[in-house]
Every structure is written in C-alpha cells, then in structure tokens.
Image (tube, coloured by chain):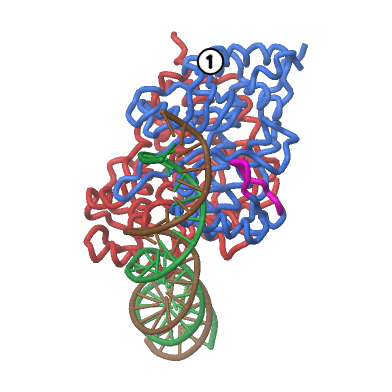
Chain colours: A red, B blue, C green, D brown
Amino acid sequence: MSQNEEQSCLYRKVSYYIDVDDEDVHHLEKLEADRATYPARRRLRRPGENETDLLIVRRGWLYSTLEVEGSKGRHVQGLHFSGDIIGLAEITLLNNHSSLITATDVELCRLPRESLCELFETMPRLAALFFAFGAIENMILTERLAAVARLEADARLAHLLLQIHSRLRITAPGGGMWFRMPLSQEVIGDAIGLTQAYVNRTFKALEDRELIRRHDNGIELIDVPGLQDLSGFSDRYHEIDQSWMPAKKVL
Amino acid sequence: MSQNEEQSCLYRKVSYYIDVDDEDVHHLEKLEADRATYPARRRLRRPGENETDLLIVRRGWLYSTLEVEGSKGRHVQGLHFSGDIIGLAEITLLNNHSSLITATDVELCRLPRESLCELFETMPRLAALFFAFGAIENMILTERLAAVARLEADARLAHLLLQIHSRLRITAPGGGMWFRMPLSQEVIGDAIGLTQAYVNRTFKALEDRELIRRHDNGIELIDVPGLQDLSGFSDRYHEIDQSWMPAKKVL
DNA sequence: CGCGCGATTGAAACAACTCAACTAGAGTGG
DNA sequence: CCACTCTAGTTGAGTTGTTTCAATCGCGCG
C-alpha cells in the first residue's frame, strides 16, 4: 500500500491484479509522470499520424474508431476507461491507423515508447504485466467479436453494457448497478454493428423487459442474471493467472 | 542465417520481422523442442481444461471456437497457421475457455508457460517480440470486428480471404494467388457471422463477379484490387516498428 | 454400391436498415 | 426570460439482406 493510492489509476489497476511492492509503486508513478487534460469531444489522434506513444487513462472515457472504406461509416473498435492503456495494439505500427476521440473530459498520461523498452530491459515483472494487459484487451475483443457475429441486437447491447460495467468496476470497485454512459446511440451502434435508430429501439426493448433502466445520463442494470442469460456474458477480466510471470524479487 | 532455417517455422516468422543473430536462433530452436503431430478434425482443447501452455504451429491449420450461449451455435474466434503462436490471448486465464480444433493434419510445438517467464527474465528482446505478436493478433481481431460489424456478406468474405492470404504469405512468401482452404463453409460462416447457406451464395456471387475462383480445394484470388475495393482491406501485418524494442546486444 | 458429409439451391420469414419526420433538452444570445 | 439553434433521441413505414428450413446434388470412402 502507499499513500499515493488515489493519485495513480495505473496503480489501482495493477494492484487490482497483482501484489505490488514499494519499488513497483515507484516505477508506476514514474510512468504516470507526464500528465495532461483534454476536453470532451476532441479528436486526439487521426489515422496516419506519427503519435504512437502509449497513453494511460487517469480519468474519463475515450473511444477509438476505424474508418471503414468501401461502405458507409466507421467502426468503434475500442472503449477506454480509467486505468486503461491505450496503444498497446498499435505498438507495432509506424503510424497509427485509428482515430482517438474523447467522450468526456479526460486526464491522460503519456508513456513514451522508450519507457516500454526500459520496462522490458529492467522490469520483467511489470513488462509481463503489460503483456497480460494486452492479452486481456485481446479477450475483450474476442468476446465482442463473438457477440457481434452471433447475437441479435438485444443480446449484443446487453453484452456491451455488461462488459462496460464489468470493466469499470476494476478501477472503481464496490460501485452499484448504475454507471454514467457518455456515449451517444450512434457511437454505441458503431461499436456493436447496429444503426443509431435500431440502438434506440433496442434500448427501449431492454427497458420494456425491465432488464435495464435509463436515467441521469446513465444506465442502471436492473436484472443482471437476465442480461447474462440473454447475452451469454460472463466476466473474465477479474482474475489473472500470474504463475507464468517473473516472480517478485526476494528480499 | 542458419542451416536450420527450414526446420523452424517460428524462426521463419521471427526473422520475417526482425534481424536475428545466432544466439536468438539458438533460443528459438529450444522453444520449438517439444513437437507432436495430430490428425485433422481433432479437438485438442475444450473449455474448462487446464491446458494453457502456448502452442506454436509448425505445419497445418487450426481454428479456435467459442460456444455462444443464449443463442444457437458457436463462433470461430481465430484461425491459426504455420508460424502462429496459440494461447497468447488466454495466458491470463487459469482455464482456457475456448476449443481448439485441427482443420488439417498439424505439427505443433508445446511451449510451457515457464519458458515464457524465462523469456521475460533473460531475453527481453524476444519477450518484446512475443509482445508484438500479441499486438498483431490484436490488430487482426480489430479488423475482423470492424468487418463483421460494418460490412455486408460479400465484403466480409472478401476481407477474410484477403486476410488469410496475407497471413499465409508471412511464412510462405512468394507464393501465388492460390491457397488451399481446408475450412468448411460452416466454419467460415462461424468466423464471419453468416450462415453456411449464405456463405455458399456469397462465394458464388464473388465467383460470378470474377473476383475469385474456387478449385483444387482452395481459393484463387483473381482480382485483388477489386477485392480490396470491396472490403477495404489493407495489409498491416507485414512490417513492424522495432524502435521501442530492446536492442540487440552489441558485440 | 450405398453411406455420409459438405455444397448447392429455392421459397418463405424476419431482423435490421433506410429514410424521414418529429420531439426533447441543453446551450446561447438577445 | 424567451426565442433560437443544435444535437441527440424517438418513432413510423417501407425495404432489403440474411436467415431458416428443406430438398437435392456431388463426391470421397468403406
């Protein structure tokens, strides 16, 4: 534990998963040194830019989009909350190919690529954890892909809501069944492959069935078992196997 | 270079991306030590099992599936070819939750989790490369998600075919426009979110438009620009940025 | 030869889309 | 404090892409 607990959301996330000692805490704080805030509804990155440093979300929501040529519109490929690391998937690219957009006011920490190099060379345990974060992102994508490919609209939306709720609880544990939802129906549709109009109808259908309720710019999950039953969602981000990770240094 | 080049497909893949020296080659060969072959159409892993070691594909095709509850059927979440590393995404799980099925006869190398630990502790450069492989897998998923969420059947299928062709060329460079396709239409449908019957119609439609041709149990890409135009696919797996990776040791 | 699996094709049903009009609410300026 | 604007959400009617279900075909294999 450290008195800086509430200052570092990466710490909150890391400590959610593994035991951290004071030395780790020290490293984590260094990684979150370069901070900045941005207002809502700003495009922070565009395709083709050379901005490929990692970003750690301290506060707020962002989403990244991919323009889909050969058809109308775009696709929302990822949602990013407090504690998330943005850019792991694009680390192999010279230029990023997606856009990054703030949904709310956000606070971000820039993590230069060189820091990642340092991580691998001198902190294998934390490097392995970053590797694990990449793997978790992968699982999230895999689940969304299965949901979009195989579920109907109501189940897809239910899946998304459960996934968001589950992910939010990692850095804000103990919260209730309500969460703020700063994404427009259009953005939600772009994330799960529906049109805005149909997202609306589907929200209404879930409300009519008393599975969720919408109020105060957010979503309240009323019947979680019902939503799970509908969507087949089960929570897999809440525990990770550390057996393969380099051990903590023995004193 | 090494005289073992043709013996190690992980080497082929790694050397496709980064410069490897003799020491690296030595390590890679050790990783591929534990080999085994399996016949086609075998389920090698099931959900809930404790088989979570990494597998490196030396030869053949496999695919992994996720049972989608709350609805009919399953989803094919990934295709695995020669040179691929299976299991990176599930490294954080105590039990795997997907099935792994051979599409053809395959030859695999088992890579125990402990080796991964060793990789992080003593070979940061290779560890970073494994990290990069995870990131590439992530990009592949992201693209498939965008395709499934936003494209129509013909474009989705075109996207899948281009993606497969592009990935196959990494370990089998210089090949032509034809490749063997050992997946049934049902499996293809499960991968891109279509029914078997509609996959068939869509294949026919692509053939009628002279974009592809089907023969000899495989696919020939006739009009690649046309397919790219239709699907918006562009190849992003063929170059990786190494600037953030630990440097080779200086002699 | 006959079995069985996968591919092909047809017809009817339906989920989701398109397009368009309308409403609600939040913010702005006079 | 009201009128104006703008964005996001709501709703309806008609259309279409995809599914469903079923029947048929083709082919490799025992």
Left or right: B147 in relation to B170: left
Residue A224, x across and y down, in percent = 24, 50
Q: Secondary structure at mark 1?
A: strand
Left or right: A6 in relation to B179: left
Q: Amino acid at mark 1?
A: Arg
Q: Mark 1, chain letter?
A: B
Residue A247, x across and y down, in percent = 45, 15
Residue A190, x across and y down, in percent = 49, 59
- Above or below residue A227? Residue A70 is below
Q: Residue at x 59, y 19 (%)?
A: A122
Does residue A160 belong to the magenta stretch?
no
* Residue under numbered circle 1: B35
- Above or below residue A97? Residue B167 is above
- Above or below residue A233? Residue A210 is below
- Toward which corner of the image does residue B1 lie, by quadrant? top right
* Viewport quadrant of the N terminus of chain A: top left
Residue B134, x across and y down, in percent = 55, 33
Q: Residue at x 37, y 53 (%)?
A: A151
The one nearer the camera, B12 or B195, is: B195
The one nearer the camera, B249 or B185, is: B185
Magenta region = B214-224
- Toward which corner of the image does residue D8 lie, by quadrant? bottom left
* Viewport quadrant of the C terminus of chain A: top left
Does residue B223 belong to the magenta stretch?
yes
